[in-house]
Image (cartoon, rainbow, N blue to C red):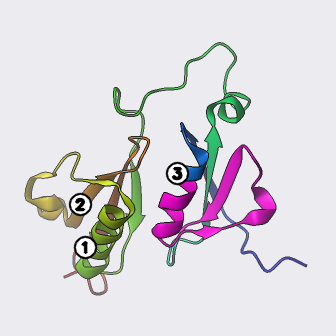
Amino acid sequence: MSTTPRPTFFLNLPTTSLPTATAFYTALSFTPVQAWSDAQTAAFLLPAPNQAVALMVHTHDRFAQFTRPGTAIADARASSQALFSIMCKDKEGVDGWLERVERAGGKRDPYVMEGYGEGMGMYVWSWEDLDGHVWEGVCMLGMGGGA
């Protein structure tokens, strides 16, 4: 019987280099799931408290098998496709993500939200993974340690 938590949400992303993406997400403390990984896909669970979300990173050939025939795979650096937000307990948790991203080779601040989201009751910093997908660490101000 597997002890791997059952995710409630799967995020599927294309990559131009599966080995590089695997090293990047592992450096960010994503938990590899070998049972769901193969030569074309690297599977992970997001770090706590977000481990109910699975990240499936696919080669372009594999990713195309899951998408509408004849459609192009977007270049995340050339167009906005989606924004992936990871909930953090507090501002220090958000800042910790940025430090890990930079150490792993990701790009900090592809954009900066005015006031880092304070006007919307958040503390938000963004980063770009090695394929140009934009992620952000978020804590909700006034909830838990976010104040």
Instruction: Give the residue furthest to the bottom.
Output: 145
**Residue 95 got which mark?**
1
Dividing the picture into quadrants, the one containing residue 142 is bottom left
Question: What range is drawn magenta here?
Answer: 21-46
User: Image quadrant for the N terminus?
Assistant: bottom right
Residue nearest the observer in this picture, 125 or 115 = 125
Q: Secondary structure at mark 3?
A: helix
Query: Residues at badges 1 and 2 in contact (C-beta under 8 Å)?
Result: yes
User: Image quadrant for the C terminus?
Assistant: bottom left
Q: Earlier in the sequence, mark 1 or mark 2?
A: 1
Q: Secondary structure at mark 1?
A: helix
Residue designated by label 2: 125
Name the residue rendered at 60%, 46% in the picture. 18
Residue designated by label 3: 20
Query: Taking 19 as reference, is 67 above or below it?
Result: above
Dividing the picture into quadrants, the one containing residue 122 is bottom left
As shown in the figure, which amino acid type bears the numbered disc 3?
Answer: Thr
